[in-house]
Amino acid sequence: MTKRALMVLIVAGLAAACGGADSAERSTAVLEAPPTVPAALTRRGPAHVVVNLETREVTQRLADGVQYTYWTFGGTVPGPMIRVRLGDSVEFHLNNHPESHNPHNIDLHAVTGPGGGAASSFVAPGQTATFAFRTLNPGLYVYHCATAPVGMHVANGMYGLILVEPPGGLPPVDREYYVMQGEFYTRDAYGVPGHQPFDMRKAIAEDANYVVFNGAVGSLSGDRALTANVGETVRLYVGNGGPNLISSFHVIGEIFDRVWDEAGSEPNSNIQTTLVPAGGAAIVDFQIEVPGTFILVDHAIFRAFNKGALGELRVSGPPDSGVYAGRIAEGIYLPEGGAVQRIPVPPGEPLRARTTADRIAFGQRVYTQNCAACHQIDGRGIPGAFPPLARSDYLNADARRAIGVILNGLSGPITVNGERYSSVMPALSLSDEAVANVLTYVYSQWGNAGRVVTPDMVAPVRAAAPRPAPAAAHE
Ligand code: CU
């Protein structure tokens, strides 16, 4: 049987089984590459829709200076968005480009049938596979390749979205965009230049080097940023190709007025961050009240600032000081790169204080890191909540007691300088040396008694109230 005869048979079978859609309007789906969304459908009833999609393997920019060989639907990551309607019969033609090195197929989550179409669409390079399905459920669905090794095909970029409009369509908005998250597993760390091969070991460990929107770092930034005007309502069709990670999708400085979470049929309202599962989607709408740059992120925040999951929506128009007022600084929420950062420690610094001056200097650092958030950098505390350390009668009266408070914590009412406090201080996991240093620092400051506390004074207090060993990280 010829391929065309087979297709006629498939489509005729679908039409017969589903109630004579062969008399329906016939059209070819207009596919749009991200972040463009195909126009809303204007027809009132179901149709017979032909989809032609080609798998292609292309080497493109993953980040500045970094190339990656993507396996794609249609040459982009994600693949083009497909827009059909509830009740349509879809005649799907999957072509595999002759220069591909791998066979591919497609599993559309909008399909009711074996493998979501994957069972009928396995296609070798240079070939075409054809199948047909009826859209039985409205919603926004992921499609992806399901050829073994499945995870590798998905990780290399083989995913996209298909929207099945409900009868009557979705509520109209001013702008629609197509954003899909995915992560990449490369041999070298984030940002290491050159052509980066896929690393299956990292993929299995779910240890992604890159987490990005629309296939590459910066694909929605600068000249490629999404745009809108004040007063408009923006809709984002948000997908997550994974292969592994769940997206905590958030737009900094906006609140989603309406979210079809998990792309279900009932919208929720007033959402700050919506979860988009791997292999899932959401539709988010928000009206824009003020101009500025609004940042799209996966709010699992290291992914945003250090792995690429940052996009921009640039909004033009008049300000509205009734909604937001303030001087606008540039340069916040910029990518920070993948370098592992450490708080610098001066080289050659002795591990143990040799002089009281050392002790005070080291103790200041311990204080800043561990104590200042409550007792304040100037030791004044916060009235009614955290007692002062400055000129504190409680502190100055008894160094041994002060050591015990740091080692063991303190709860219950105490009186400091005539004021009652009943907050809880947690026990701090600090070494004897660090306790001695921080107390010596505190005693040296703010009009306090100027005592020197040594590790020899701390050890017996610790021994009197046995506690778990201190964390090794604290000196
Ligand atoms: Cu594939």
Image (cartoon, grey):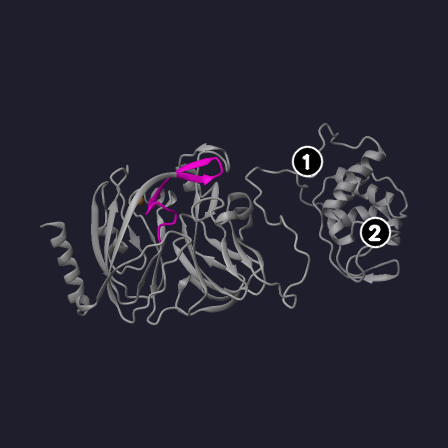
**Front residue of 192 and 264:** 192
Which label is found at residue 389? 2
Q: Is residue 444 visible?
A: yes
Q: Is 419 or 461 nearer to us in this picture?
A: 419
Q: Is residue 285 above or below residue 35?
A: below
Which quadrant of the figure has residue 421?
bottom right
In x, y percent, where is residue 317?
57, 61
Q: Are marks 1 and 2 in contact (CB under 8 Å)?
A: no
Q: Characterize the local packing of mark 1: few (<14), some (14-19) or many (20 or more) Cα atoms within 10 angstroms.
A: few
User: From the viewer's perspective, is 89 left or right of 307?
Assistant: left
Residue at which label 1 appears = 344
Residue sitting farthest toward the top = 348
Q: Residue at x 72, y 47 (%)?
A: 370
Query: Outermost residue toward the left?
Result: 1
Picture quarter with ligand 1: top left
Q: Position of residue 336 (x, y in %)?
A: 58, 42
Answer with left or right where residue 90 lies relative to residue 12: right
Callout in the foreground (1, 2): 1
Q: Where residue 216 sits: x, y (%)?
A: 45, 44
Residue 297 visible in the current orientation: no
- Which image quadrant is residue 374 in? bottom right
What is the CA distance from the residue labelled 1 to the residue labelled 2? 28 Å
Mark 1 or 2, nearer chain start: 1
Q: Is residue 332 magenta?
A: no
Res 414 → quadrant: bottom right
Left or right of 414? Residue 290 is left
Magenta part of the chain: 60-80
The amino acid type, in three-letter code, at marker 2 is Leu
Q: How many marks can you see? A: 2
In depth, the one of 180 and 289 nearer the eye is: 289
Q: Nearer the viewer, residue 350 or 81?
A: 81
